[in-house]
Every structure is written in structure tokens, then in C-alpha cells.
Image (spheres, helix red, strand yellow):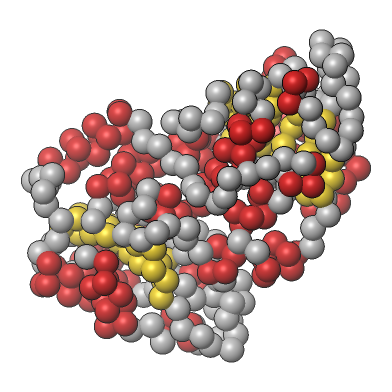
């Protein structure tokens, strides 16, 4: 077990003086990854002299590229180098070479714990989700209710650290933008004739996980019409490659003009563009957390999910939600009449917009 660092001892309290290298296993969703940044900052605060490496899937890497609390990023390429069981063996070998002293697992699946175990990392910290306690040296008990109903996800990730005497400085999010992504965003906006002093409103009509989280395209379009009529703002439609169709539908329904960026930017470029927005309107999604982390004025539309656990953390964030008996149901597809979204009118959202613009 890490013979190169004989000072490591397995005890409940972690000694910063003996821990040289820390591996953090990231979550696999953009929004969740952003919500781990307070815990990452706390790890840096508790281990100021340790080298901190993030192990992350490629699509969440932009969240951490400019994070000042991260020293290295290790890509978990499950579609190529680390694909299949041979790829997992290769991943374990890749991790072993780094001789980590500690693994902190924000990713909840048993696979994360198994990889850390067979990588012979002496100290392995995480929740005992997915029956993986056997593979952890520092296991934190958690129930499904605690994760999804009782606490915000930022506190959930911080909760991995506190049982072992590690402190933190709160739930503020960290998201930095590279100069190259700033330049790409500026170039794109200039190409559409959008100047630095022009007002920009971003709209994110999609959401991963299922259609239940999505407010309706025709209502987003009607809202955009009101915003353009009142403020003359440029409208940017955001979304992933799989959301091109919904982005196109909203764009076509808008009476004036809008720029459909769905699938046309990298995540890093989208983050930079959101930083340029005067307002961002979105469903509960990863880009919602991007806007909150950047403190971009934000209107978040919630239906089947719970803002208490996944709501945006930002001083300029507003939530629009109608209470219906079946919400939050956390279902990906609505089994009823989608009342939680139908009850949210265009005027209701526009009234919130007017408080932020």
C-alpha cells in the first residue's frame, strides 16, 4: 500500500503533513461537478501543500481547467483509452503510477470505489452508496432521503469531508474562464454583430435526464418576444448537441431574431458566453449552475425537481416554481399532465425578468 510514502497511517483524522498527493473523483454531470467546487476548495484549504488531481470524464473537464484549487486533471476516457474491462485495468495502472495517498470520491457509484481500491490508494473516502463501503477506508453513511430531499448538493459533497475533521469556508461556487474561451466567445458575438455594450439574454430550453424538467418551447419563444420588445436584447439559445431540435424550434417561434447555439459551442465557450449575458433563463440544468457560479442574473424554472437540493447558488438567482401536490416527483418523464410546468405562465416568468434586467 503506497510503499513510497511510509508516513501514511489509516486513522479517522487526516494529517495534512503526511499527505502528498490527493485524487478527487469527479461526478459525471456538469451541474453536479460545479456543485463539488466548494468541497474542492475545502480540500485545498485543509491540504495546502498537497498536489490535487481531478479524475473526470472529458465533458466535465472544462469545469476544472481554470480552477485555482486543482493542480492536475486526469481524463477518464471511457469511450476510448479506458473503455471496457481492459480500459478499466489501464485506468487503474494510470492511477497507480501517480502514487496517490488519498482518494476522495464525489462520484457515488461502486465503480469509483473499486477503481480506487485496486489502484492501491491507502486512504479512500466517500459515501457508502451503491454498497461500496467494503472498498472504502473512510466510509460516510448516507441515505437516499438525505441526498435528494433534505440538503443541498453542495452540503452533500461537503459532508464527505466533515466527519474526518476537515473544515470548509461555505458553499460559494468556483468557476473560472480561460482566455482562449473568452476570445472564442468574443469572436462569435462579433460575428453576429453583437458589441460589448449590447444587451444579451441567454435562453436554455433543454435539460438532460428527461422532458419533465423542460418548460415549453412556445413559452420560451413568447418570453423572448416580450424581452426583445421591452429591452431590445439579443437572444442566444443554448443547448447541447442533442438539443439542436428544441433549440431550432424555439428559434423559429421567436418573432424577431435569435441565435441558435445548440451544439455549436464547446462547454468552455458556452461558459464564456454565459458570462457575457445580462440575463440567463433556464430549466434546472447544468448550465443553470454555470450561470449561478458566474453570478450572471438568472431565472431558473423548476418543475419536477427540488430547488432545496439542486437550486442555483448565486446572489442574482431567482427561482420560478408553482406548488402542485405531485412535485417534486423527480421523474424524468411526467406520468400525469405536467401541471408543475403548465401552471408557470409567460407573464409570471417575465415579471421575474423585470426585477433582474
Give the position of the C terminus as an image quadrant: bottom left
Residue at (80%, 32%) from the top-left corner?
A: 14
Image coordinates of residue 116 in percent, x first then y, are: 78, 32
Image coords of residue 161 (percent x, y): 72, 44
Compared across the picture, whether 276 is left or right of 232 comes to: right
Residue 106 point in image, percent of width and height: 68, 44
**Which residue is more in the foreground, 32 or 130?**
32
Q: Is residue 183 above or below residue 207?
A: above
Residue 111 can be seen, yes or no:
no
Q: Residue at x 82, y 49 (%)?
A: 140
Relative to 97, residue 188 above or below? below
Question: Does 13 sit left or right of 262 as displayed?
Answer: right
Q: How many marks?
A: 0
Residue 190 lies in what quarter of the image? Answer: top left
Res 269 visible: yes
Q: Residue at x 55, y 78 (%)?
A: 334
Name of the residue lying farthest toward the top: 4
Q: Looking at the rendering, in which quadrant would you find the N terminus?
A: top right
The residue lying toward the viewer, choosing from 299 and 56, is 299
Snapshot quadrant of residue 164: top right
In this view, the residue in front, 55 or 18, is 18
Q: Is residue 169 left or right of residue 134?
A: left
Q: Residue at x 44, y 41 (%)?
A: 175
Residue 44 drawn at (x, y percent): 61, 32
Amino acid at each position: 500500500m503506497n510503499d513510497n510514502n511510509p508516513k501514511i497511517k489509516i486513522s479517522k483524522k487526516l494529517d495534512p503533513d503526511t499527505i502528498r498527493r490527493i485524487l478527487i473523483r469527479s461526478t459525471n454531470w456538469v451541474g453536479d461537478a460545479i456543485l463539488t467546487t466548494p468541497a474542492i476548495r475545502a480540500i485545498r484549504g485543509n491540504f495546502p501543500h498537497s498536489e490535487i488531481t481531478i479524475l473526470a470524464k472529458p465533458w466535465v473537464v472544462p469545469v476544472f481547467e481554470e480552477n485555482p484549487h486543482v493542480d492536475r486533471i486526469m481524463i477518464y476516457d471511457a469511450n476510448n483509452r479506458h473503455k471496457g474491462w481492459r480500459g478499466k485495468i489501464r485506468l487503474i495502472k494510470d492511477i497507480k503510477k501517480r502514487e496517490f495517498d488519498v482518494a476522495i470520491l464525489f462520484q457515488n457509484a461502486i465503480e469509483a470505489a473499486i477503481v480506487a481500491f485496486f489502484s492501491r490508494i491507502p486512504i479512500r473516502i466517500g459515501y457508502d452508496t451503491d454498497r461500496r463501503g467494503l472498498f472504502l477506508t473512510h466510509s460516510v453513511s448516507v441515505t437516499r432521503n438525505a441526498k435528494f430531499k433534505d440538503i443541498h448538493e453542495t452540503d452533500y459533497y461537503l459532508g464527505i469531508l466533515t466527519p474526518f475533521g476537515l473544515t470548509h469556508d461555505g458553499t460559494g461556487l468556483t468557476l473560472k474562464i480561460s482566455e482562449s474561451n473568452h476570445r472564442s466567445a468574443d469572436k462569435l458575438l462579433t460575428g453576429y454583430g453583437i458589441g460589448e455594450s449590447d444587451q444579451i439574454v441567454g435562453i436554455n430550453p433543454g435539460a438532460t435526464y428527461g422532458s419533465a424538467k423542460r418548460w415549453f418551447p412556445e413559452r420560451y419563444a413568447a418570453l423572448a418576444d416580450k424581452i426583445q420588445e421591452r429591452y431590445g436584447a439579443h437572444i442566444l439559445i443554448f443547448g447541447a448537441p442533442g438539443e439542436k431540435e428544441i433549440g431550432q424550434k424555439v428559434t423559429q417561434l421567436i418573432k424577431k431574431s435569435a441565435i441558435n447555439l445548440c451544439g455549436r459551442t464547446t462547454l468552455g465557450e458556452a461558459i464564456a458566453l454565459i458570462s457575457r449575458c445580462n440575463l440567463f433563463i433556464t430549466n434546472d440544468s447544468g448550465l443553470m449552475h454555470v450561470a449561478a457560479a458566474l453570478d450572471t442574473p438568472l431565472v431558473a424554472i423548476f418543475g419536477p425537481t427540488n430547488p432545496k437540493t439542486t437550486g442555483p447558488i448565486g446572489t442574482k438567482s431567482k427561482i420560478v416554481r408553482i406548488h402542485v401536490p405531485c412535485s417534486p416527483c423527480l421523474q424524468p418523464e411526467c406520468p400525469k399532465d405536467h401541471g408543475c410546468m403548465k401552471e408557470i405562465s409567460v407573464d409570471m416568468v417575465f415579471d421575474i425578468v423585470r426585477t433582474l434586467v
